[in-house]
Amino acid sequence: PSKAERLRADAVRRSEPSAVLEEEARRTREEAAAYGEALAGRRLEAGQRSGRAAAWDEVHERNAARLLALCIANGGVYVKLGQHAAQLDYLLPPQYTRTLHQLFEHNRASSYEDVSRVIEEELGAPPEALFGSFERTPIASASLAQVHRATEHGTGAPLAVKVQHAGLREECASDLQAVGLAVAAAEWLYPDDFRLGWVMGEMAPHLPLELDFTHEAANLRRCAAFFGACGDAGGGGASGSDGGVVSSSGARGGGGGGGGGGGGG
């Protein structure tokens, strides 16, 4: 096998616990899809019986707008949960998935003062001292972090610096508990019509990893090794990291503030 294939095989062996989590996630998604089909059928039948389908559509539109406002106002975990809900088109009424889909495009950016403070707390110095240049306006912002263009001291090499929104790690545990309590209460009140506890079961173990940018930096280095073994090292790699800040070389235009998968959304 090629060097790239050996690296991939080693990575798979090292991530056996992740494979178990992925299998559990797949199983819960399949169960949720089956439940969603049954629930959609019951909704349609109830609407036809009552003749109030249009009225329910208005209720869903109004409540979806309220949920969107709540997610944006609270940020962090709530935006991640809203993004997750936006993909449950097999389970939720379309008014919710359509409205919450806006969370993939529009997220509130942290102020430069907060960004500078996070960098100094994590790396021991403000961005002006750590980088040759650092753009104050982010090129992208997402639920957990935002990305700034910068250059490396001395070489001038372009960097993408991903900075976690201030206070997220401190708020993460309490936010997960609050949302978990609300979901559990809804399931208890409406046992036949609300079964979304599995969403929290998927988020809870993964979110701390997404907030640990040292973990993300390790993933970036692994990706760079994979591409380098294939003869394409154009993707760059992690050049420095701490818990709430990660910088990667080879920065190009655009880029995300960190969606779910790579670890920092």
Image (cartoon, rainbow, N blue to C red):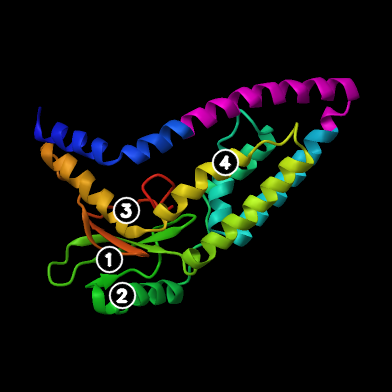
Q: Residue at x 14, y 44 (%)?
A: 233
**Highlighted range, magenta:** 25-54
The local secondary structure at tag 4 comes to helix
Q: Amino acid at mark 1?
A: Ala
For the residues labelled 1 and 4, say whether their Cβ atoms are less than 8 Å apart. no
C-alpha span from label 3 to label 4: 23 Å
Q: Quick one: label 2 or label 4, which is nearer the N terminus?
A: 2
Q: Residues within 10 Å of mark 4 (few under 14, many from 20)?
A: some
Which numbered marker is on residue 28?
none
Q: Quick one: label 1 or label 2, which is nearer the N terminus?
A: 2
Q: Residue at x 72, y 51 (%)?
A: 66
Which numbered marker is on residue 127?
2
The local secondary structure at tag 3 comes to helix
Coordinates of residue 3 in the picture (x, y in percent): 10, 35
C-alpha span from label 2 to label 4: 37 Å
For the residues labelled 3 and 2, say whether their Cβ atoms are less than 8 Å apart. no
Q: Is residue 239 above or below residue 6?
A: below
The mark lying in front, picked from 1 and 4, is 4
Which numbered marker is on residue 199?
4
Q: Is residue 125 above or below residue 91?
A: below
Q: Which residue is mark 3?
A: 216
Q: Is residue 251 left or right of residue 178?
A: left
Q: Quadrant of residue 43?
A: top right
Q: Residue at x 32, y 53 (%)?
A: 216
